[in-house]
Image: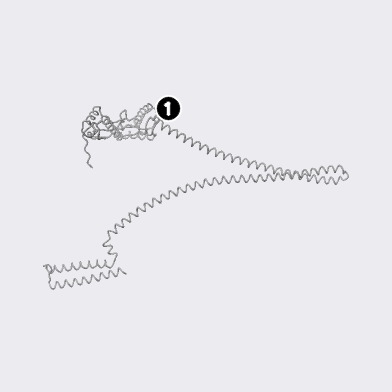
Amino acid sequence: MYGITLIAVLVLVGGIIAYLGDKIGMKVGRKRLSLFGLRPKHTSVIITVCTGIIIAGASIATLSIASQDVRTALFHMKEIKEALSTSEALYKTTKAELGEVEAQLVEQEQQAAELTLQIEEKTRKYEELDQQLQLVVIERDAAEKDLNDAKAALEGISERYEIAKQQYEQATMDLDKAKSDLNATKTQLGEAVSQLAREEKRYDNMKQINERLDARIKELQETEKHMQEQMALLSEEYETYIRRQEDIITEATRRLQEIQHGDFAFQSGEILLSTIVDGGMPMEQARAELLTFLRQVDRLALERGASIDGKSSAVKVQSEEHFNQVMQTLASQKDKFVVRAVSISNTLVGDPVVVRLMCFPNQLIYRKGEIVSSIVINTKNPADIEAQLLGLLQNLSIAGLEKGMVTKADGSVGDVSVDEFLNAMAAVRRLPGPALVSAVADSNIWTAIGPLKVRLLVESAPESPAK
């Protein structure tokens, strides 16, 4: 209803302004008035345009005055869009974090459920064993009670048997003394014999019951013995497990002590040997090349003290799959490759060395005249200069090894002549201040074409800017 009223007011105001503008335009046209020296026709057009501007301005002003939403849309739209973008980004971030939290919660609930099931299973087994033990104890107590009852009944039968026996003897004596009362005595004797037979039969029944109870007691005793044996076996298995764990810990401790105090044949990551292999050959030839290279590595490892128990070799390849991958790499590309045998762990003297084969394709790593490495020397002491220049050469070897260059017999890749080295020392000593020594590639350097031959360029070190 509010919107309809606002539209009606806008239509009414626009109509009134248009009507007034039309009247003004007619008067200007009849009187042929002129503004700014323009022709009356052009003046009328200007008045019409101004009337339209007034209508649009009045409409916007009326909407702004009448509606807070219109004022917000006109003057705060950019702020609203920025706030909306920020809210959407915050919503997406919060939703992503909520998803991660829910995933973690589900995983933790699954772990908790698994642990609960394991605890319930262990508890159930323990309760079953406890119930079985309680049943055995109850059955044993019941059997002992039945045995005591049977013994008491047997004692009563024995007493009655003795009494009956005494009565029989007395009857026999009475028979001898009173032959005249033979019929009566025979009758009494028959009754006594019948009673004795009944008592003997009852005694036999009680004896059978006693035997069955003895058998049941033996069965329960055997069950108890079996349970005790099972408990002893479980205890023995637990002690065996504990001893096995102690043996493992002892062996690991011994191995650690050997590593700490033993002599290493090879360090982890050490390059045992490297060679150059032409790629693009058949698989069988690539395999033969790698096996020949590994035999050379094996001889070197044996010389360094590594060995395999019961074998005349000392080198193991990381895995058959790794060996096949290297072989396929060599066979698939027609290029020179630098192949290295690298120790994957520290190896003690007397242990086998496990190696990983690394392939580097032949590629240009330094152009002629390119600076490979540099160092600033601030001392004039010959020993210190020599040490720092040797450090520079060591950095050259490290850089070449990282780029995959083939190594020399001593494991290095750099090559500087003795004269070059001595001349560099002398040049450093002649300079009045710090010297910048740069190792510059003497020719194009390739990974599979060694060595890394450089020349040493000595010049004054640039002054550092004042602080």
Q: Is residue 83 above or below residue 357?
A: below
Residue 218 place in picture, x, y as percent: 65, 41
Mark 1 packing: few (<14 Cα in 10 Å), some, or many (20+)?
few
Q: Amino acid at mark 1?
A: Lys
- For this view, does 155 lie left or right of residue 185? left
Residue 238 place in picture, x, y as percent: 52, 39
Q: Is residue 458 above or below residue 43?
A: above
Quadrant of res 398: top left
Quadrant of res 38: bottom left
Identify the residue at image location x=24%, y=67%.
Answer: 61
From the image, tell me which residue sits under label 1. Answer: 311
Q: Quadrant of the N terminus?
A: bottom left
Residue nearest the observer in this picture, 75 or 29? 75
Q: Is residue 450 visible?
A: no
Residue 391 place in picture, x, y as percent: 28, 32
- For this view, does 11 lie left or right of residue 199? left
Quadrant of res 427: top left
Label 1: element kind: loop
Identify the residue at image location x=80%, y=43%.
Answer: 166
